[in-house]
Image (cartoon, rainbow, N blue to C red):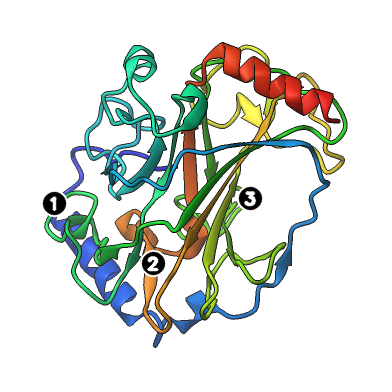
Amino acid sequence: MALSRPKTLAVAAVAVLALVASVAVMCRGTSNADQYVSDLDQVLNEPETPSVLIDCGTNADRHLNADNPVVSPGIPFGAHHTHEYVGNKSADAMSTNASLAAAPSTCEKNDLSSYYWPVLRLTDGAGHDAHADGGGLHGNTGEVLRPKSVEIRYEGNPVSAVLPMPRFLRLITGDPMAFTNGYGEKVRAQWGCADRPGRYTTKYPLCGNATTLRGYEFASCWDGSNTDSASHRTHVVFPLASGGCPAKTFPIPRLRVTIGYDIPAGRPFAIDSFPEELRDPATDHAMFINVMPEVLMTELVGHLNRSR
C-alpha cells in the first residue's frame, strides 16, 4: 500500500533513506544485478474467461502526482513516491466521490474510474522532479518513462456469474512494502516481456528489444456491502484456487491492468517506492477507484455473464 508516513518523522531520517535509495538504484545493474533477470521463471495458469476492454489511453496529458486517494485521502504527497494515472483526470489526495463523479476522463464509454500505479524511471539521468516530494526528495530519481501501452481488462469468473462492482469501490493490489515485509503473501508484482506471453517474474526483466510489461490483477470476491475497509483489502479478497469465491463473498468482475514500456537496451530502470523499500521490483502495486456509471457497469457485467 502507498501508505502515508507520520508527519513527526525526522527530516534527517527521510534524507538518509532517500540518499541510500538513490545510491542503491544508481548501482543497479552492477552490485545489485540480482534485481534484474533474463529468465521469466513463473507461469500464469489462469482459466480463460470472457472479458471486456476499456480504452483509457496512455496518460498523454501526463497526470502524475505523489498522492494516493485510496490509501492516503486528504494527505498531499502522502505516497512518498509518484503515481501515474489513466482514467479520471481529477484524481488526487483531495478527491471525493462527488468530485470524481463530476470530472472528465481519458477513458472511453464515459468510464470515470481512476487507475494508477508507481511511475517507472530510467535511473541513469535526472528527472523533472529531482528536488520534489515523491521524486528526488524521497530517493526516486531518474527520468519518468511514458507507457507505450495501457490495457484495462475486466474478466468474468470461471465458475459462476458475476455481480456488478459497487460504484466508488476502492481496491489495491500488490505490496508496496514487500522489501521490508520480507516478500510476504501480499506480493503481486508481475513483470514480463511481450515476446514471452504467459510468463512473468517479480524482478526487473531484461527484455532486449521486446516491450517490457507490468501486470496487475485485482481481487474479485466482494463482501457484498462495503466499498472500502481499514486495510483496503478485506472488503474484496482473491478467489480460491478453484476460481470460486470464499464463503460469504460474491464474485465481481476481475480487473487486470497491463502496461507496456519500450526501455532502451542496457539502460537501468526502476519503479518509484518508499525510500526504505529501495525501489525493489517486488514492491510494484496499483490502485483503483470504480467511478463507472451504473448503466455501463450493468452492460459490462451482462456481457461477461452472457459470454460464459
Q: Residues within 10 Å of mark 1 (few under 14, many from 20)?
A: few
Residue in front for this viewpoint, 245 or 180: 245
Q: Looking at the picture, how far across and down is residue 30, in whole percent?
A: 39, 88
Give the residue at mark 2: 270
State whether residue 125 is above or below residue 112: below
Q: Indicate which label's residue lies in the foreground, 2 or 1.
A: 2
Circle 3 sits in a helix, a strand or a loop, which is it?
A: loop
Circle 1 sits in a helix, a strand or a loop, which is it?
A: helix
Q: If you read the primary sequence from the N terminus, does the residue marked by circle 2 or circle 3 appear first? A: 3
Specify the amino acid type for callout 2. Answer: Ala
Cα distance in 3D space between marks 2 and 1:
24 Å
Specify the amino acid type for callout 3. Answer: Glu
Disc assigned to residue 185: 3
Q: Indicate which label's residue lies in the foreground, 2 or 3.
A: 2
Give the residue at mark 1: 11
Residue in front for this viewpoint, 162 or 17: 162
State whether residue 53 is above or below residue 122: above
Residue in front for this viewpoint, 223 or 286: 286
Cα distance in 3D space between marks 2 and 3:
22 Å
State whether residue 246 is above or below residue 127: above
Q: Looking at the picture, how far across and down is residue 281, in whole percent?
A: 48, 63
